[in-house]
Amino acid sequence: MDAKKLQVILNTAKISSINKAAEKLGYTQSGLTYLINSIEEEIGISLLNRSHMGISLTDEGNELLPYIEDMIKSEQTFFTKAQQIKSRSTDKITIGAYPSAVVAWIPDALRAFEEKYPYTEVEIKIGSKEINDWLKNDEIHFGIVDKSQAENYYFTPLGYDYMYAAIPSDYLLASQESVTLRQLAQEKMVFSAGNSKNVVLAQFQAQNIKIPHILTVSTVNGMDLLSMVSNKLGVSFISSLYLKSCPDNVRMIPIAPPLKRTIGVISKECKNTDPKILFLLKTFKNYSKYPLALKDE
């Protein structure tokens, strides 16, 4: 016996009218009557009283009521459990992201995601320029990148990431409240091999400032750059998301005018239909530290 059919019996008795029940439950009057009759015929017991006073459960129906309710509850429990088991499948979402995002806010977003989808594996591939290749080759579902990397992909902005100048604390510039690119051009600079180098150097060119002596290291981790600045290998440009991780002998100073990049999500599809990916993207937007900066504009 289908528990959904028995639920129709209970709903009809509760509404106490074939006409009203048919309208509310999406049946024609004749269709609902036929369904009720077929159920009663199948079990060999009359479940409903029909009279000018309305519809009600028979004595037999009342006696069977707790068992009917148990059947309905068991079926609901069955489908709920089936969905849980389904979600335990080897589903896996792979993301490409900047190290600063991974350090600053992705962990909080993932904790929220895991509460809803505890059996879905999430893999984070940390990178920079290679994120585009990962997306192209379907190695990731989406990437968190600078807008300049969007290329031909769909881009959903999260906000602005402000770049700070990381300067050894005993340098003269470290005593200032803000620094300009022209001032920084007098110092040796340490860059990562990531995309932020191109963003910064483009600003030097836009302001007709001679590009300074540069040391490029094969890392995309801001902590590695801060370590090099701490060891006085030069000054660097670091995401504002590393402010709380700055060593004691390094100062992170705002750049004037502000140097920023637009951070967002790139994907192959304009609107993903996978509910898990949609929820993860929504969670990222909720937990991202970037959106507050958008309000500055």
Image (spheres, rainbow, N blue to C red):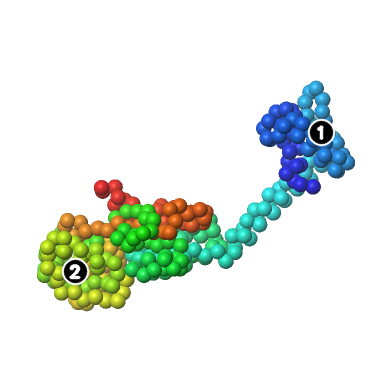
Give the x, y percent position of residue 270. Answer: 43, 53
Q: Residue furthest top?
A: 52
**First of labels 1, 2 by sequence position:** 1
Q: Position of residue 225 (x, y in %)?
A: 26, 72
* Residue identifier under label 1: 48
Disc 2 marks which amino acid? Ile
Of 258 and 127, the residue lying toward us: 127
Q: Nearer the viewer, residue 90 or 152?
A: 152
Q: Is residue 226 above or below residue 285?
A: below
Give the residue at x 13% y 60%: 207
Badge 2: few (under 14), some or many (20 or more) residues near its Cα, within 10 Å?
Answer: many
Residue 217 in picture, x, y percent from top left: 27, 76
In the image, residue 136 sits, relative to residue 19, either above or below, namely below
Write down the quadrant of residue 171 in the picture: bottom left
**Of labels 1 and 2, the one closer to you:** 1
The answer to whether one can see residue 124 in this image is no
Please indicate whether residue 63 sits to the left or right of residue 261 in the image. right
Q: Residue placed at 24% from the left, 72% from the top?
A: 191
Q: Residue furthest front?
A: 152
Q: Secondary structure at mark 2?
A: strand
Q: Is residue 292 above or below residue 188?
A: above
CA distance separating discs 1 and 2: 83 Å
Q: Is residue 32 left or right of residue 197?
A: right
Q: Is residue 223 left or right of residue 286?
A: left
Q: Is residue 239 left or right of residue 253?
A: right
Q: Which mark is residue 167?
A: 2
Q: Quadrant for residue 11, please give it.
A: top right
